[in-house]
Image (cartoon, rainbow, N blue to C red):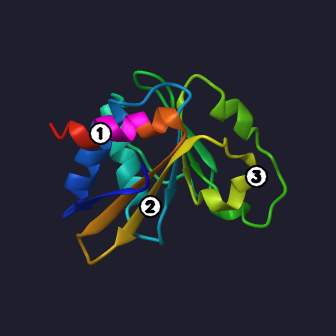
Amino acid sequence: MGTYEIKSYSDEESQKIAARLALLLKAGDVLTLEGELGSGKTTFTKGIAQGLGVKRIVTSPTFTIVKEYDGIFPLYHMDAYRLEHSEEDIGFSEYFNGHGLSIVEWAEFIEDYLPSERLNIRINHVDDQTRIIQFEPVGEHYVEVVRKFINDKA
């Protein structure tokens, strides 16, 4: 399986797509979110959080690097943008091998720390409301997650 695309026509639809995906994920999973500023990475994370039953308001972790949320299992929301030229390891492996779901925005800045198996998600800005969300599974577990996601459009 290569890359799968889905189109979203609003923030609410993007969140519903993400919430549906969250139901297929488990503790220890890692998602990377790529896209230009304003493409909807944090909006997508809000949908994942909804799907995991997170009650707190999800905001971008740009200045804190990592925000943790309690849900069905922990959600670790990371923003690696400020780590572009940093050699600092802030304990990524503890998160990636921990008891929660890790979502990494701007993951290309910490490529060396990312697990080899993960679900890469790219959000492309089409216009004010429309986004193309691309899913690229890396590893058999994520291939299966995307297959289930594609086949269960409920």
Q: Which residues are magenta?
A: 144-149
- Please determine whether, in this image, residue 73 is positioned above or below residue 59: above
**Residue 50 can be seen in this image:** no
Q: Residue furthest left?
A: 154
Three-letter residue code for mark 3: Asp
| Mark 1, secondary structure of its residue | helix
Whole-percent x and y of residue 150? 26, 43
The residue that label 3 is drawn on is 112
Task: State which quadrant residue 38 falls in.
Answer: bottom left
Q: Which marked residue is nearer to the observer: mark 1 or mark 2?
A: 1
Three-letter residue code for mark 2: Arg
Question: In the drawing, does residue 111 fall left or right of residue 140?
Answer: right
- Please determine whether, in this image, residue 14 is positioned above or below residue 141: below
Q: Is residue 115 magenta?
A: no
> Which label belongs to residue 149?
1
Question: In the drawing, does residue 118 fall left or right of residue 123?
Answer: right
Q: Which residue is at a point 41% across and 25% down the rendered structure image? A: 71
Whole-percent x and y of residue 119? 49, 45
Question: In the drawing, does residue 65 fall left or right of residue 100?
Answer: right
| Mark 2, secondary structure of its residue | strand
Question: Of label 1 and label 3, which has the lower sequence position?
Answer: 3
- Indicate the quadrant containing the C terminus: top left, top right, bottom left or bottom right: top left
The residue lying toward the viewer, choosing from 118 and 31, is 118
Q: Residue furthest bottom?
A: 127
User: Label 1 vs label 2: CA separation?
Assistant: 16 Å
